[in-house]
Image: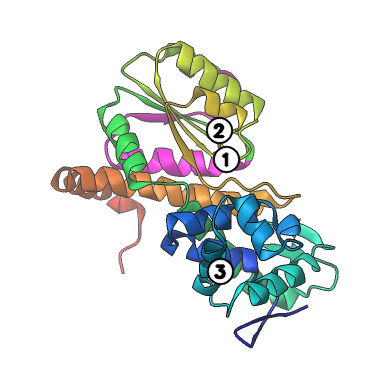
Amino acid sequence: MIFYKEGVIMPDSISLHLLLESRYANLRPSERKAADFILAHPAEASQLTLAQTAEQAGVSQPTVIRLARALGFSGFRAFQLALVGEQARRGKHAMYGYDLGADETVASVPAHIVSTTIRSLESMLKYISGEMIEQCVELLRSAGKIAVFGVENSIVTCRDLCTKLLYLGLPCVFYEDCYLQKIVAGSLTGQDVALGISYSGSSRDTVDVMETARESGAHTIVLTNFRDSRIARYADLLLCSSNEQLLYGDAIFSRTAQIAIVDMLYWGVILSDYDRYAAVLDRSSQIICDKAYTP
């Protein structure tokens, strides 16, 4: 299946959904409103007229036309044809950013994985603001103790975050054992920070431990994918990597977004007091320099 944009044949690997999200940050507020409606209701939008689309999105008809042109289409009709074409491909299994079907080949995997990873990161920019990262960094810098919580796939991200913060000299702990996580959460105080990581936001152990940390008086930071997830109830600061629910396979790309947010926090701490943290990193590197062979 292919669709046309300005007379150019677009391959399946470049989805309209990806195009919308990659251009989202450059759209006007009213155009973003129209884009939000289409992203949330692609099947419905593919069947609507220009007037109906504008009405459902709560914007003017010229706004919808401007959105189509901002995406590179000649007008609304060309845009809708692309949307219809994309919906026709939905008989396959939906993974994050592309459809996986039995007709796919192993040789196509590299292109799919790279394009989907790029898309997931671009999408994340809709939900992560510089101001939010600044607030999280300030909490982490001033914490008496930083306790990181997570299970299953999020353990990789938890380890990475804890390692980076320790390299910067921050008092961070992470235990994989859920019993120890609960004990640590119960010992936190108002001087401490609990940071919970759960892609789904519904992992019982992580949700419960963040509830315990909140009850203990700790400041709480939550890194999840879904803004309305259960774990978000216990977040003073919420870092939402996306907000899109798909059929399955999300975990393949969830760690990419999570690690990117960890790097944002890491860089943010360094830049908050560059000379201080650069010196700490140098000392940490010197301490472990005997662990690597020299060239």
> In the picture, residue 227 is in which quadrant?
top right
Tag 3, which secondary structure?
helix
Q: Is the magenta stretch mostly helix, strand or loop?
A: helix
Residue drawn at (71%, 64%), measured in percent from left and top?
Answer: 49
Residue 154: give its label. 1
Q: What residue type is labelled 3?
A: Ile
Residue 220: give its label. none
Q: Name the residue under label 2.
A: 150
Q: Give the range drawn in magenta.
A: 153-180
Up/down of 76 relative to 156, above or below:
below
Q: Which residue lies furthest to the left in this view?
A: 275
Q: What residue type is labelled 1?
A: Ser
Q: Is residue 78 left or right of residue 21?
A: right
Q: Name the residue under label 3.
A: 65
Up/down of 228 relative to 192, above or below:
below
Distance of label 1 from label 3 (alpha carbons): 41 Å
Residue 7 on image: x %, y %? 63, 88
